[in-house]
Each structure stands twice: as structure tokens, then as C-alpha cells.
């Protein structure tokens, strides 16, 4: 057992996010996302019994967002003509604001098919969830761990 690691995060995912480097991308997908095809070049982690918000909150406790890009967090845009509400996006904004001083300004959107393409080409990891909200997919770009994020050094 480890201390201060959210229990929802499986060992496989902890290993993957530890392996990821600066600017690597992680996608947390909703239950409708075509993970086997769009995530075929990524490490796929299944978390079917969980929703995106609880996974996002747990990951951001450990995962620094990239400070060098305008939007280290990206959501899949709603397709023109789809009459779909996305209240889950407000939840994402609240969660991101807990862990990044840019708050909602750290969040951008990517057109649906471009989101698929970016996932296929650039995602290091895709997490498959049981999320039922529509357009609930979210892409995170990893930043660097800075000295102010480190625990105090061990002293004898």
C-alpha cells in the first residue's frame, strides 16, 4: 500500500502516468469512445466501473498539467446540429481549478474528428471508463514537476 495515492487509481495506471514525460497526452474517455481503434497506438487502461470526473480528480492529484501550452486540457467539441447539453464540462472546470491556477482557462476544445485523430496519433494512454455523459472525453497534456511541487527533503 502507498500513502496519499487515490485508491481509485489502479497500479497499471500509476505505472503509466509515472512513465509519461513532459508533453505526453492522456485521454480519459466516456463509454461511447472507440477506444480499441482510436487508442490502438496507446496504452489502454480499463476503468469501466468509474466515471470521468472521479478519475480526473484522482489523476490531477499526481499529474502536473503542461504550463507551456495554452490548453493542457482539451474537451471533445459537440458536433454542429447535436442538441446535447454538457453539464459535465462544468464539473471538469471545477476539478481542474483545484489543481491548476489557470482554472477554466487551461481548458480548450477540439473538434470531434480532430480529437479522434489526436488521440490516435499522440495519446500515450487512453483510459476507458463507464461514463454515460455524452461528449465527456477529456485529453490531458502532462507538464513537469517543479521544485515547489516536491515534498521536503528527508532530514536526519
Image (cartoon, grey):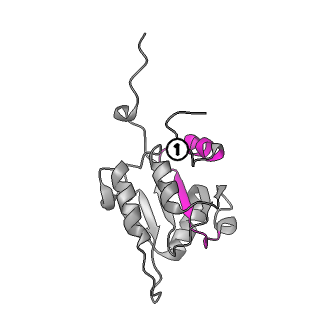
In reply to whether residue 28 is colored magenta, the answer given is yes
Residue beneath the point at 37% across and 49% down: 99
Residue at the limit of the structure toward the bottom, as seen here = 81
Closer to the camera, 66 or 94? 94
Answer above or below: position of 7 versus 36: above
Q: Quadrant of the N terminus?
A: top right
Residue 65 percent location from the top left of the image:
41, 49
Residue beneath the point at 54% across and 75% down: 113
Residue beneath the point at 64% across and 42% down: 11
Residue 19 percent location from the top left of the image:
58, 41
- Does dot 1 land on a helix, a strand or a loop? loop
Residue beneath the point at 45% across and 87% down: 83
Q: Quadrant of the C terminus?
A: top left
Closer to the camera, 41 or 102? 102
Residue 4 percent location from the top left of the image:
49, 37
Q: Is residue 81 left or right of residue 8?
A: left
Answer above or below: position of 81 versus 54: below
Closer to the camera, 144 or 90? 90
In reply to whether residue 116 is colored magenta, the answer given is no
How crowded pointer 1 is (Cα within 10 Å; few <14, some 14-19, many 20+) is rated as some
Place residue 7 in its image quadrant: top right
Place residue 72 in its image quadrant: bottom left
Count of marks overlaid on the render: 1
Instruction: Tell me which segment is drawn in magenta.
Output: 12-34
The residue where tag 1 is placed is 6
Amino acid at each position: 500500500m502507498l500513502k496519499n495515492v487515490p485508491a481509485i487509481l489502479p497500479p497499471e495506471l500509476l505505472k503509466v502516468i509515472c512513465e509519461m514525460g513532459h508533453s505526453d497526452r492522456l485521454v480519459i474517455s466516456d463509454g461511447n469512445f472507440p477506444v480499441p481503434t482510436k487508442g490502438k497506438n496507446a496504452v489502454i487502461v480499463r476503468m469501466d466501473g468509474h466515471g470521468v470526473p472521479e478519475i480526473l480528480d484522482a489523476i490531477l492529484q499526481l499529474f502536473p498539467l503542461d504550463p507551456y501550452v495554452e490548453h493542457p486540457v482539451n474537451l471533445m467539441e459537440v458536433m454542429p446540429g447535436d442538441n446535447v447539453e454538457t453539464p459535465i464540462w462544468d464539473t471538469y472546470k471545477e476539478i481542474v481549478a483545484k489543481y491548476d491556477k489557470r482554472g477554466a482557462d487551461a481548458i480548450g476544445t477540439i473538434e470531434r474528428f480532430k480529437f479522434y485523430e489526436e488521440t490516435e496519433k499522440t495519446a500515450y494512454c487512453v483510459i476507458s471508463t463507464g461514463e454515460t455523459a455524452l461528449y465527456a472525453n477529456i485529453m490531458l497534456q502532462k507538464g513537469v514537476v517543479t521544485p515547489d511541487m516536491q515534498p521536503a527533503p528527508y532530514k536526519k
